[in-house]
Image (cartoon, grey):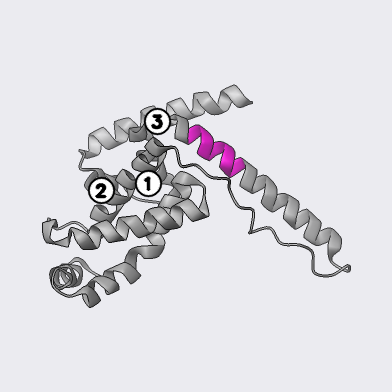
Amino acid sequence: MNLDEEKKLVYKAKKDPEAFGKLYNEYYSKIFAYILKRVANVDAAQDITSETFYKALKNMWRFRWQNIPFSAWLYRIASNEIANFFRKKKRKTVSLEGISEPTSNSNLLEEIIEAQEQLKKHEEFLCLQEKISTLPIKYQEIITLRFFEKKQIKEISEILRKREGTVKSLLHRGLERLRREMDAIN
């Protein structure tokens, strides 16, 4: 959806919940993925995503079009909800549902190797996510948006309402801190 189409849909969504449903369908998976990468917990990510879209719907009347994607506003709301989540310390255990049991004896060895690889990737992600979560929030947001959400510096600047130079500087400092944290493990 281009910016002109999105602008029309956003203004329509201010009065028509069905139009908001189209925005919801467009951005739900992206916002959910962002939140999941920040909290590393499926249940918490679902709750935070729901709260993000609830607050967006409730506050649509406040939204002012500034020729940036509507998703920037959603990411900002999501970032605030994530900060609230961590402030309240509602951390739960992480589910390993993605790792399945072997289905047949003929491929048992292959399935065990695959499960071990998935578990290793999951453990590495959790370790990285844990280290990222020890960084100040300003670095967590920048690193997650840049590397997990694949956002460009300009997009991050729009989402966080910071100058591009500030975003680059925060990204550099955040990565340096993360590198030091990871080096301490190895």
Residue 52 at x, y percent in the picture = 31, 55
Instruction: Check residue 172 in the rendering and tell me which mark sits there, or answer none.
Output: none
Disc 1 residue crowd, few under 14, some 14–19, many 20+, Cα 10 Å: many
Reading the chain from its start, which is encountered first: label 1 or label 3?
Answer: 1
Q: Secondary structure at mark 2?
A: helix
Residue 51 against residue 102 in the figure, above or below = above
The amino acid type found where label 2 is placed reads Ile
Label annotation for residue 159: 2
For the residue marked with disc 3, what is the amino acid?
A: Gly
Question: Which residue lies at the image location 35% right of the left edge and 40% below the top edge?
Answer: 83
Residue at 88% x, 69% y is: 106
- Residues at marks 1 and 3, CA–CA distance in whole angstroms: 12 Å
125 is within the stretch colored magenta: yes
Per the rendered image, the range of residues in magenta is 124-132
Quarter of the picture holding the N terminus = bottom left
- Residue at label 3? 174
Residue 176 image offset from top left, x and y in percent: 44, 26
Q: Is residue 146 magenta?
A: no
Tell me the SS state at disc 1. helix
Residue drawn at 25 percent across, 48 percent down: 159
Marks 2 and 1, how far apart in space?
Answer: 9 Å
Report the front residue among 55 and 185.
Answer: 55
Residue 145 x, y percent position in the rendering = 37, 46
**Residue 88 coordinates in the image, percent (x, y):** 39, 38
Q: Earlier in the sequence, mark 2 or mark 1?
A: 1
For marks 2 and 3 on the same chain, the one whose residue lies earlier in the sequence: 2
Q: Looking at the picture, which amino acid does disc 1 mark?
A: Leu
Please identify the dominant SS of the magenta region: helix
Are the two marked residues, 2 and 1, in contact with CB atoms closer than 8 angstroms?
yes
Residue bearing the label numbered 1:
145
Mark 3 residue element? helix
